[in-house]
């Protein structure tokens, strides 16, 4: 079904649409993270991205269970946002020469992408309250929690990179992350 042909008449239909968007986003995040993992040479970053890809598969299972609990099926959506995101990443990454800056860029973009996902979950969680299924709320909360854990890991990896480049810890915390 095409995004532009969807007519939403009830709050439950809105919830099902938002849940479909969350599922499409979860599906589409994997190829982006896979591509980011392929362009990094840092083993810690690669491991973190590959672990997040593994978690993405579990998230899809949880979202499918949400649909099962409410007796609905996901709507197939295009998910063009991730397509635009990865294309922009490719262009920008090609311009970055510093190895340290490239490592930070990969982490920053992975973090940015997952924050978009967290925003999707926030909206669908609140709308999901109307389903009356406490299991749906729990499953959606665990999806968002997985994303929060990943963003915390990316921030820690970024901080380690910056501090490893001779930027004192106090400066990192006062001024934010600064590439070389």
Image (spheres, rainbow, N blue to C red):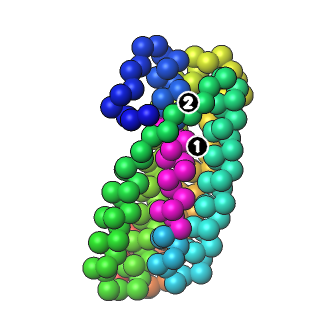
Q: Mark 2 and 1 residues: CB-CB less than 8 Å, in contact?
A: yes
Q: Nearer the viewer, residue 84 or 180?
A: 84
- Measured as percent of width and height from the top left, residue 159 is found at 49, 71
Q: Residue at x 37, y 34 (%)?
A: 3
- Measured as percent of width and height from the top left, residue 50 is found at 62, 68
Is residue 95 found inside the magenta-colored segment of the image? no
Q: Residues within 10 Å of mark 2 (few under 14, many from 20)?
A: many
Q: Which mark is residue 132?
A: none
- Measured as percent of width and height from the top left, residue 4 is found at 33, 31
The residue where tag 1 is placed is 144
- Can residue 70 be seen from the camera position used here? yes
Q: Which mark is residue 125?
A: 2
Magenta residues? 21-34
Residue lying at the far front of the rendered structure: 1
Say which element carries label 2: helix
Which image quarter is the N terminus in?
top left
């Amino acid at each position: 079904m095409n995004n532009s042909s969807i007519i939403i008449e009830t709050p439950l239909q809105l919830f099902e649409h938002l849940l479909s968007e969350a599922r499409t986003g979860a599906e589409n995040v994997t190829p982006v993270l896979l591509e980011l993992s392929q362009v990094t040479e840092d083993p810690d970053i690669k491991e973190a991205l590959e672990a997040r890809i593994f978690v993405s598969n579990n998230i899809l299972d949880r979202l499918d269970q949400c649909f099962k609990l409410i007796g609905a099926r996901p709507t197939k959506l295009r998910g063009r946002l991730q397509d635009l995101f990865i294309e922009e990443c490719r262009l920008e990454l090609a311009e970055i020469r510093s190895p340290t800056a490239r490592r930070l860029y990969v982490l920053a973009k992975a973090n940015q992408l997952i924050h978009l996902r967290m925003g999707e979950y926030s909206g669908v969680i609140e709308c999901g309250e109307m389903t009356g299924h406490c299991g749906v709320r729990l499953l959606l909360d665990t999806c968002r929690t997985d994303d929060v854990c990943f963003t915390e890991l990316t921030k820690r990896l970024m901080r380690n990179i910056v501090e490893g480049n001779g930027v004192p810890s106090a400066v990192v915390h006062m001024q934010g992350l600064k590439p070389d």
